[in-house]
Image (cartoon, grey):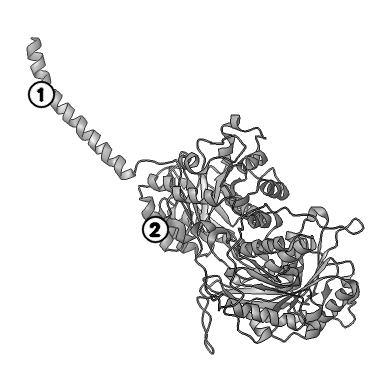
Amino acid sequence: MVSLTLVAAVWAASVGSSAGSASVQPPRSRWAARVGSSDATLTPTAMVARAAARHGASGRALEIPRGGAKNGELAPILVVGSLNVDITLEVDRLPERGETITTADPNSGRTACGGKGANQAVAASQLCDASAGRSTKFVCQFGNDGHAPMLEKTLSERGVDLSSAGHSTTAPSGSGYVLLCGDGTVSSVVVGGSNVDWPESTDYAALVSGAGIVLLQREVPEAVNMAIVKAANAQGVPVLQDAGGEDRPISDELLSMITYLSPNLTELARLTGLPTSTDDEVLEAARSLLKRGAQNVLVTLGSRGSLLVGEAAGEEGLLRQECAAVPGGVVVDETGAGDCFRAGFTVALVEGRPIKECMRFAAAAGAIAVSRMGAVPSCPHRDETAALANTISPGPELDLRGGGGDSLDKVEEVDEMARLGFASRLNSMKDRLDLWEGDNDVLGWVERQGTIKGLTMVDFNYPQHLSELSYDDARGALSSAGLKAGAVCLRFPKEMQAGAFTHPDEAMRAKAIKLTKEACEWATELGAEEVVVWSAYCGYDYSLQVSYPEVWSQVVEAFREVCDAYPQIKVSLEFKPTDENTRFFVVPSSGAALLLANEIDRPNFGLTLDFGHCLAAGENPAQSAAMVGSAGKLFGVQLNDGYQRLGAEVRWKSRFARARNQSATAASQQILPHRRQRAL
């Protein structure tokens, strides 16, 4: 992701104000546009104008109802399935048959909670309206090893009800080995472990009782799924069966009892034995499952969106949904994206929303998931998913009624603006209060930003903007304003004036690291993918005042600790060569910042270039951006009104001024004697 900050001069010309409200034109606003790397060539004016033109094309805003109630309580979502310890290995490519390769990163091998069942349970829990009393119950089998407490803790912290989960006494936790390529694509190998160890005495009817919908996968024994489906059918509870998991046929008996069968393209081909490379072939394969007894087939098409075939799709029996734009424009990791899609569809379905809205909500959930690292860590929250769903506009219809359609594997060329989101920092909302009738506080500033046409995101300062708020307060304000969090920008407090990561006191350095991790936690909770770190204090005022290698190492180790603690968050350094608080910053240039990034050596560490800061360093900002971008470390660019004269130009003007003064002095020495003579 690249973030661009645009000067306020563009505002009035290209953005304007929302209809029916006063024109809001803060004099020093800072706009951040988060885009894919290929968008960096767009001019700021073009980006704003084109984004403004696209704003509002998505149709009616998505309002999420709370769903029906039963005896005053909302029926829970029941997820029955697997959970694993996911071990992610980053590779440049997949190994060939019989080949051994090494990981792209020698430190690769992150562990996290995963498994299709766990992913869907967490996603459903975070996508549900918790305030309305809807819960997500997860039925699984924990292992008898040391991973089980971690898995249980992770799920509980995310609001998943584990009251009906079991614990195997004979099998270790399931595990998943994920091979993650540089373009975000993944391949996995799953070890069943406790996922295949289900007690024969399980009362499946009792587990299903009272559920609003059941969500299944194929990483547990088929007998378990069959028992759950039969119990659900007997009680009139709908079932969505994810086709992902073990490579095995699906029986006609099971097909006939499933409300929705949801495969991806590969799984569809595997289940039917039919090709799925063209539009016609996808439709034919899906309809072959209907002929075998399936009621509805919901196919995920990757970058082409999704396709629903069956009675739920309306009179024509066919419904297409385009995919949502990936936040940031970059696919980071596809792990768990399909799980989040199906969880989103399930949540919307149980809430009684129209089927088209179910597919929009699901598309948004899947898009958010691929923009982050990991499976469970990438699961989206309700407010950010609804906000993204509102940006999805109707796409072109697939040619599915004959004639040999285009290949579904071909990635469509996406308009650059579809990947853009515009953000502004909240402090600009303090100005011109005569144009604003709302509250003059953080929540009021978020509300005010929501009135600005074309604005889709907010950049928060931490801790200044967020320390007095709860996660729910901030998420609620964003949702009400129709915005999402773009980034959390760290601002160290005055007590760290002697240094944050470079403070002489080790305890104060630890406090600065802790504060940075808190910012990452806020970013995670708000659905932002980036934390931007700008330190006004990490530096020195006089030559030889500090040990340069020592303070450099302190910065390296601090960022490594933060990046390792939050691998799903992009941690970005915004360098500044000098400041009224620190005469010399420890990272004084783009070149030095690249050296720092190379030494930190973490994929989620990068740089945000502020053009004003580049100019202060005597750099050509465009060349700096090109250099950092070529290294794959350009996470953000800020275009603002902080322009300064180039350092070289200032020095040249100083020399010119000195030469001019010297010439004037010499001339006066020649003239004065003549004046004296005339005076005499």
Say few, some or many: other residues with alpha carbon within 10 Å of mark 2 (under 14 / 14 to 19 / 20 or more).
few
Q: Is residue 113 left or right of residue 110?
A: right
The x and y percentages for residue 93 are: 51, 78
Q: Nearer the viewer, residue 183 or 155?
A: 183
**In the displayed structure, would residue 572 be above or below residue 91?**
above
Task: Give how far apart the Cα atoms at labels 1 and 2 are.
Answer: 53 Å
Is residue 171 in sight in this rendering? no
In this view, the residue farthest toward the top is 680
The residue at the point 60 percent across, 58 percent down is 393
Which is nearer the N-term, disc 1 or disc 2?
2
Q: Circle 1 sits on which residue?
A: 670
The x and y percentages for residue 305 are: 61, 68
Amino acid type for the residue under numbered disc 1: Gln
Which quadrant would the C terminus be assigned to in this image? top left
From the image, state whether disc 1 or disc 2 is nearer to you: 2
The residue at the point 53 percent across, 36 percent down is 25
Amino acid type for the residue under numbered disc 2: Ala
Q: Which of 163 and 261 is in front in this view?
A: 261
Q: In this view, does 489 lie to the left or right of 151?
A: left
**In the displayed structure, would residue 508 be above or below residue 677?**
below
**What's the mark number on residue 643?**
none
- Disc 1 element: helix
